[in-house]
Every structure is written in C-alpha cells, then in structure tokens.
Image (cartoon, helix red, strand yellow):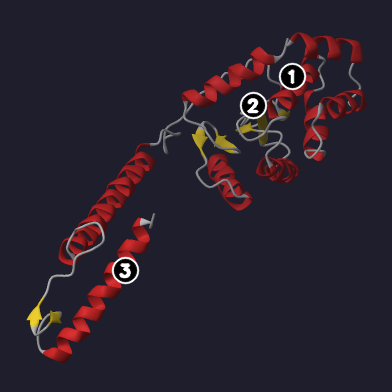
Amino acid sequence: MESKTTVIIGAIVLFLAGFFIGQLTGGGLRKGGQAVQVVMADGRSLDVVLSEIGSNTAATKKSMDELMARVKGQGQRRAGPEEGKQYTFDLSERMPRGKEGAKVAIVEFSDFQCPYCQRMANSLEDILKQYPNDVKIYFKHRPLTSIHQFAQPAAEAAEAARAQGKFWQMYDLIFKNRGALDQASLEKYAAEAGLNMAKYKEGMQSGAFKEAVNKDTAEAEKYGINSTPTLFINGYHVANPTPEEVKRLIEEALKK
C-alpha cells in the first residue's frame, strides 16, 4: 500500500506537470485536444487532493498556533514568589551560618544534588567572609526529586547531622562531594563530620528525618518555589541571584 505522503507527492508532480503542459498548450491538461480531469488511484480528482492538502496545512497551522498560545498562557500563570512581597518562613530550630544578630538574613531553598546550588553555596561562603558581622544564612530544603534521585536522602542526612548539632559541617561535606551522594558516601561524610554513627544510621533507617525535609518542601511548594537555588533577603525574593546582585541587595538592606 502506498503511503499518504507518496500519494501527495505524486499529486504535486502531476499538478506541476499539468501546469507546464497547460502553459505550453494554452489550456489545461489535454487528451486528444480536450481538457481532461486528472483522477488519482483512489478515485479523487487532482483538484480535490490539492484542496485537501491546502486545508490540512491551514488546520495544522491553526492547531500549532492554539498550542503555543496555551503554553504561553500557562507560563504567564505559573505560580512563584511575588516580587516586592515580604515573606516569612519557619526558621524554628534552625541555627544560621553567621552571627544570629546580623541585620541581613538570607534564606536559601536548595537541593544538595543541584550543581547551581553548589555554586551558590560557594558564593554565599564568600559573601559571609565579606560581611562577617552583617549577614546570616538560613538553609531550607527543596529537593527536586523528579530529577535528582539522591537529593532527598542527602537532605535527610543533613537533618541527621542537625540533630547532633553538626548541620553546617555536613552541609559543607555534602556540597563538596555533590557527585557522590549514595548511602555509603553519606555515611562516610557523617563520620567525617564527627557524628555518632549508631544514632545516624538508626535515624536514617527509620526515616526519622523525612518529616523535617518534607516540611521545608511543603513550604516551598506553598510559595511556588520550583527551582533551586531560590534566595530571599530579609524576606524578599531575589529574582536574579547572581553574586553581584546578592551583594547589591545586601548593601541596600544595610542602608535601611
């Protein structure tokens, strides 16, 4: 059986042939001096086939235009942190990195397996060195589990370290070794951080730290935080969290 594409190509070839013959003879395709109608193998005339080709092309274009309009509309309606709105977060039981009395508080929603989060961690470390008395950083979990299979267990491992007062030590080790976050590797980092390994393993195996991670994730979803890293400075969303922009906003906050 011939494909539809083959029939269409054949129709176009016949049409073009007929056109040029018509130009040469002064009329349509002729047989014995009379104009004739070209009939396809399926019984349809060439005129009908060409008309259908034109209609299908127009319909396809219309469908694509409608699809693009819907996609654009969905993008415009996508939920996310509002610019200019001050947010408050649950920071209970969170020990910030930096001085607790610092004027500028940065809240970061992050994923331990995210390469951009690793870069942000390095940038924030540099910022703390530049503003040792003025900036403090709070870390919130936003594991993107659909694309990062080790993000959730890494977050739970960090919470296990928090339970033993060593969150930031574990945070540094996990980000330093972002490419190796399987169970054995996480246990290695926990030991390097100085954790009580019996307590660590027991908590990880029982799922004792899932709730803390899931609580952060739920808070992130509530505010439409679907990408990492996402930063807030004194409660205001940082739309473009480059190191330069973060420093600029810190300077602005210090002047208030």
User: CB under 8 Å between callouts 1 and 2?
Assistant: yes
Quadrant placement of the N terminus: bottom left
Check disc 3: other Cα within 10 Å, few if <14, some if 14-19, many if 20+.
some
Q: Distance of mark 3 from mark 1, alpha carbons?
A: 68 Å
Q: Position of residue 221 (x, y in %)?
A: 50, 25
Vertical position of residue 170 compared to residue 64: above or below: above
Amino acid type assigned to the residue bearing label 1 in the image: Glu
Residue for point 73% across, 23% down: 153
> Can you tell which mark lies on residue 141?
2
Q: Position of residue 250 (x, y in %)?
A: 59, 43
Residue for point 21% across, 61% down: 49
> Can you tell which mark lies on residue 159?
1
- Extreme-front residue of the structure: 32
First in sequence, mark 1 or 2: give its number.
2
Horizontal arrangement in the rendering, residue 27 relative to residue 57 (left or right):
left
Horizontal arrangement in the rendering, residue 118 relative to residue 33 (left or right):
right
Check disc 2: other Cα within 10 Å, few if <14, some if 14-19, many if 20+.
many
Residue for point 83% across, 28% down: 169
Under tag 2, what secondary structure?
strand
Q: Position of residue 127 (x, y in %)?
A: 70, 44
- Extreme-bottom residue of the structure: 24
Vertical position of residue 171 compared to residue 21: above or below: above
Under tag 3, what secondary structure?
helix
Q: Distance of mark 2 from mark 3, alpha carbons?
A: 61 Å
Mark nearest the camera among 3 and 1 is 3
- Residue position marked by numbered label 3 in the rendering: 10
